[in-house]
Amino acid sequence: MGRLMTVVAAVFFFTVAAGWSAEAVWTTDYEAALKKAKAENKRVLLDFTGSDWCGWCIKLKEEVFDTTAFGNYAKDKLVLVELDFPRGKAQTDEVKKQNAELAKKFKIRGYPTIIIVDGDGKVLGQTGYKPGGPYSYIRDLDQMK
């Protein structure tokens, strides 16, 4: 009976713990992201990436964006926008056009480039890949206000 209770307690713990974590939710719609950020008093993180070919982009996604710590942070503080320039993934013409226009507007010269804007589109900061994992990255993002 003791083992059964241990198993039940472990299942309960992992079920509850899973509810405490959040997976980062990304959009590709810049204008919708600005509206949402303004309505929810959040900042917008623009991720200019080459998701299927850029080594540093892939590393940033794995080490930071795909972590529970970043997901929990982002759900309360950020609206996330992926502005992708893939070589092998299909995109709609609308997304390609939007991403090219935004790359020109923000003068993107390399990938990954991360730009933080407010709900009005005003630039608050810029960064890229940095080693150190999610907590270091979150600390840097918090300074962009």
Image: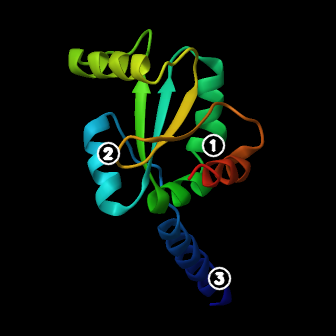
Residue nearer the viewer, 120 or 132 = 120
Q: What's the residue type where badge 2 is placed? A: Leu
Q: Position of residue 6 (x, y in %)?
A: 65, 82
Mark 1: which secondary structure? Answer: helix
Sequence-first disc among 1 and 2: 2
Identify the residue at the far right of this view: 132
Residue nearer the viewer, 71 or 76 = 76
Q: Which residue is mark 2?
A: 34
- Label placed on residue 132: none
Mark 2 residue crowding within 10 angstroms, few (<14) / some (14–19) / many (20+): many
Q: Nearer the viewer, mark 2 or mark 3?
A: 2
Q: Nearer the viewer, mark 1 or mark 3?
A: 1
Q: What's the residue type where badge 1 is placed? A: Val
Sequence-first disc among 2 and 3: 3
Residue 8 sits in which quadrant?
bottom right
- Label placed on residue 64: 1
Q: Position of residue 60 (x, y in %)?
A: 63, 33
Mark 3: which secondary structure? Answer: helix
